[in-house]
Image (cartoon, rainbow, N blue to C red):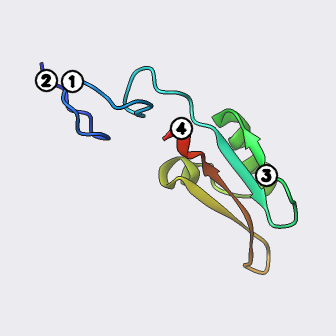
Amino acid sequence: MIRMCNECLRVNAHHPHCPEADDAPEPTFTLWLSEHTTDSLLFTEGEMRGASKTWGFDPSVVIEDGEADIINEAGIVIGGCYVNEEAL
């Protein structure tokens, strides 16, 4: 059976770190806030989902779109969370 990777369009193979591969690395995430000088690295999806409860962003948007904004009550973006590129 011929398999074609939807991500890298290789037949019966994947590029290094392809998210479609069985041995793909687990994604990591970065949480940034405009009021902080350093970003927070989140090593698991569980950590990212926990941060979403604290900071009020939608974790499903991070998973589906790669990034979600953190917006304050005045509608101003004060931070965000994104999937790190090396995991993609």
Image height of 13 relative to 75, above or below? above
| Percent position of residue 35, x then y | 87, 66
Nearer mark to the viewer, of 4 and 2: 4
Residue placed under numbered mark 2 in the picture: 2
Q: Is residue 52 left or right of residue 21?
A: right
| Percent position of residue 69, x then y | 66, 64
Which SS class for mark 2? loop
Q: Residues within 10 Å of mark 4 (few under 14, many from 20)?
A: some
Mark 1 touching mark 2, by CB under 8 A? yes
Which residue is found at the position 13% from the left and 23% from the top? 2
Residue placed under numbered mark 3 in the picture: 39
- CA gap between label 1 and label 3 equals 38 Å
Residue placed under numbered mark 1 in the picture: 12
Query: Residue 68, labelled with which disc?
Result: none
Mark 2 touching mark 3, by CB under 8 A? no
Query: Amino acid type of disc 4?
Result: Ala
- CA gap between label 1 and label 2 equals 6 Å
Residue placed under numbered mark 4 in the picture: 87
Sequence-wise, the earlier of marks 1 and 4 is: 1
Mark 4 touching mark 3, by CB under 8 A? no
Sequence-wise, the earlier of marks 4 and 2 is: 2
Mark 1 touching mark 4, by CB under 8 A? no
Q: Residues within 10 Å of mark 1 (few under 14, many from 20)?
A: few
